[in-house]
Every structure is written in structure tokens, then in C-alpha cells.
Image (cartoon, helix red, strand yellow):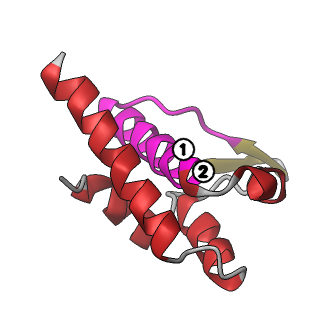
Amino acid sequence: MIDYALWEVIENGATLPKTTTVEGVVTVMPITTAEEKAHRRLEVKARSTLMMGIPNEHQLKFNSIKDAKKLLEACLNENLVGRQLQERLQRNLLKQHMKTHCS
């Protein structure tokens, strides 16, 4: 079963953190609402799921990318997203689904 919320995060990219500028100093505002927290949790889950599908020898190369959409684009550019990676992603999503719904 595909978690469509994860794919939506991957397709649309991460939400930029809210910032405010006071006297020329840019400050990142913390996540405060439950909706923002849930969306951030989905972003982290999407990135983690993609990282699980990347072969071990390529993990270090992509570890610095924090946005799931950019991570998928980088994998596509490196020709890592093939049948094997798609199968691993599907397996990992299925395992996560089974852990959360069958425990």
C-alpha cells in the first residue's frame, strides 16, 4: 500500500520554515502548530524512506540533502532510481505500514 501523503511531500517539496526579519536580522520561527508538526514529520519520513532505498555505497553522497524532493531529483540525476530502488522503496513502505497497523 502506498502512503500517498509521503508521495505528496516528495512531489511538492519541503515547506520552507517561517522567518521574520527584525532590524536586518533574519530569525527562523519554530514550528508551533500541530499541523506544522505533522507536516514536518511527514517530510522527515519521506526523506528517510528515500534514503532506505539508496544503496549503501551511495548513502554518504546523498546524506547532506535534507529535502525529499531534492533527494529524489538527485537520485534521478545519478540514475539510481531504477527498478531495484523502486522495489526497495515499495518494500520499505510496506514494512512501515505493517509495523504501524498490525502491531
On the image, the x and y values in percent for residue 64 come to 79, 52
Q: Which corner quadrant of the image does residue 48 belong to?
A: top right
- Whether residue 11 is situated above or below residue 24 in the rendered picture: below
The local crowd at label 1, few if under 14, some if 14 to 19, many if 20 or more residues have their Cα within 10 Å, is few
Q: Please, what is the three-letter code of the amino acid marked with disc 2? A: Met
Q: Main secondary structure of the magenta part?
A: helix
**Is 46 included in the stretch rendered in magenta?**
yes
Quadrant position of the C terminus in the picture: top left
Q: Tell me if label 2 and label 1 are in contact, CB under 8 Å.
A: yes
Q: Residue at x 85, y 53 (%)?
A: 24
Alpha-carbon distance for marks 2 and 1? Answer: 5 Å
Label 1 sits on a secondary structure element that is helix
- Which residue range is magenta in the image? 28-52
On the image, the x and y values in percent for residue 44 come to 51, 42
Q: Which corner quadrant of the image does residue 86 belong to?
A: bottom left
Q: Residue at x 40, y 45 (%)?
A: 92
Of all residues, the one furthest to the top in this rendering is 103
Looking at the rendered structure, which numbered label has been put on residue 48?
Answer: 1
Label 2 sits on a secondary structure element that is helix
On the image, the x and y values in percent for residue 32 come to 44, 29
**Is 35 included in the stretch rendered in magenta?**
yes
Viewer-side residue, 101 vs 86: 86
Q: Please, what is the three-letter code of the amino acid marked with disc 1? A: Ser
Viewer-side residue, 39 vs 1: 1
On the image, the x and y values in percent for residue 20 come to 65, 48
Left or right of residue 86: residue 61? right
Viewer-side residue, 11 vs 17: 11
**Total marks in image:** 2
Viewer-side residue, 25 vs 55: 55
**Which residue is denoted by mark 2 in the rendering?**
51
Q: Residue at x 36, y 49 (%)?
A: 91
The local crowd at label 2, few if under 14, some if 14 to 19, many if 20 or more residues have their Cα within 10 Å, is many
